[in-house]
Image: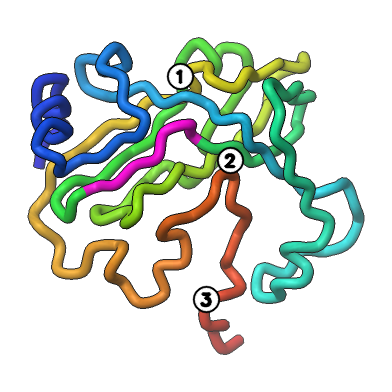
Amino acid sequence: MSILVDREIRSEIAEGKLIIQPYEDRLIQPNSYDVRLSDKFSWHEKSDEIIDPYASHTVLEGVVQATQDSVVLKPYEFILGATLEAVCLPDDIVGQLTGKSSLARLGVMVHVTAGFIDAGFSHPPAQITLEILNVGNRPVRLHAGMSIGQMVFTRTAHCDLPYHKKPGAKYNGQLAAAHSKYYLNPQAAL
């Protein structure tokens, strides 16, 4: 297992194994690919209603979806965004999304906990949903098209069941800023 370097990323893309749409060579870094912010955002309206991850109506209630050129994130405000790029990983490469250091220094967390992308994600290519949180003291404006994170690619052994072939791969082909589908998981006995 090893992290792909710039020439390996280019090779995987040239061979059609790793798909990034739209692809721009200038976004390749020594060990990653810069991903940009799309113009699609979503969030829950403020409410005291409890979200139960197993109850779809509570997850989807009060969801706002917006297409806009920028968004201002107030301190301790949380939204979903998406990468401009749609990605398709082969069954022997995993992705790891990391935030940009320059934005982190402003208090912006780009992937609150979900930065790992399984081998075989996604067929067809899909945008990566971003869980964005401002932990800083001042509002921050985020612009569609700006570099928002870096995708690191790690070569692994070929997996037996790539993500897109997994039964119940609920985020395969996801739309931008996709909300939780946890309610599709079987509920564990309490």
Compared with 64, 183 (above or below) is below
Question: Which residue is painted at 20% across and 40% down in the image?
Answer: 18
Label 3, label 1: how many angstroms apart (C-alpha)? 32 Å
Q: Residues within 10 Å of mark 3 (few under 14, many from 20)?
A: few
Residue 150 placement (x, y as % from top left): 37, 25
Specify whether 153 is left or right of 108. Answer: left
Q: Residues within 10 Å of mark 1 (few under 14, many from 20)?
A: some
The front one of 85 and 168 is: 85
Secondary structure under the numbered disc 2 in the rendered image: strand
Cβ atoms at labels 1 and 2 below 8 Å apart: no
Cβ atoms at labels 2 and 3 below 8 Å apart: no
- Looking at marks 2 and 3 on the same chain, the residue that comes earlier in the sequence is marked by 2
Specify whether 33 is left or right of 129. Answer: left
Compared with 181, 116 (above or below) is above
**Majority secondary structure in the magenta region:** strand
Label 1, label 2: how many angstroms apart (C-alpha)? 14 Å
Q: Mark 3 — residue?
A: 185
Specify whether 84 is left or right of 79. Answer: left
Specify whether 128 is left or right of 78. Answer: left
Image mark for residue 61: none
- Looking at marks 1 and 2 on the same chain, the residue that comes earlier in the sequence is marked by 1
Secondary structure under the numbered disc 3 in the rendered image: loop
Q: Mark 2 — residue?
A: 131
Cβ atoms at labels 3 and 1 below 8 Å apart: no
Compared with 133, 88 (above or below) is below
Magenta run includes residue 150: no
The front one of 189 and 36 is: 36
Image mark for residue 100: 1
Residue 131 placement (x, y as % from top left): 58, 40
The kind of residue on which mark 2 rests is Glu
